[in-house]
Amino acid sequence: MDEEIRARLLKERADAVARLRGLVVSFDDIVEAARDSNLDDEHDPEGTTIAAERSLVGSLADANERQVAEIDAALARLAVGTYGRCVRCGGDIAPGRLEARPSTPVCITCAASSNS
């Protein structure tokens, strides 16, 4: 069972890293395009601004970086035998929650209480 979990986490990690690489390229392309352009995109009513696109791509990259870190932490918990245990209360994380969010470190009760 641990090998199946590990394989799933590694696949999700590889997917997140691939998305991150693509976002970095997109970000660099946006910056490069803006450098070579004299467009006043801040006042263009027809479309999004270069700054808005750069911000969006940057936010998506940040989210993917966090996802990779969460997966790495889940792999570390798996290696030491604490995967599936809530890092806050020590209780079991429901199998359905782990199926939906395999890198989650907390049970649904603790997740809900931190969002209140």
Image (cartoon, helix red, strand yellow):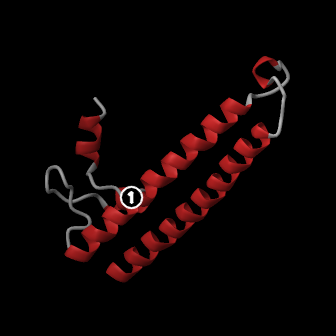
* Relative to 46, 4 lies left or right: left
Q: Position of residue 106 (x, y in %)?
A: 26, 52
Taking depth in this image into account, of 15 and 1 the one nearest to the observer is 15
Q: Is 45 situated above or below 72?
A: above
Which residue is outermost to the left? 90
Residue 109: image quadrant is: top left
Tell me if I can see residue 27 in this picture. Answer: yes
The image quarter in which residue 99 lies: bottom left
What residue did someone put label 1 on? 69
> Where, by quadrant of the figure, is residue 83 drawn?
bottom left
Query: Which is more toward the observer, 59 or 94?
Result: 59
Amino acid type, label 1: Ala
Quarter holding the C terminus?
top left
Q: Position of residue 62 (x, y in %)?
A: 50, 46
Report the residue at 44% width, 55% height from top: 67
> From the image, which quarter does the N terminus lie in?
bottom left
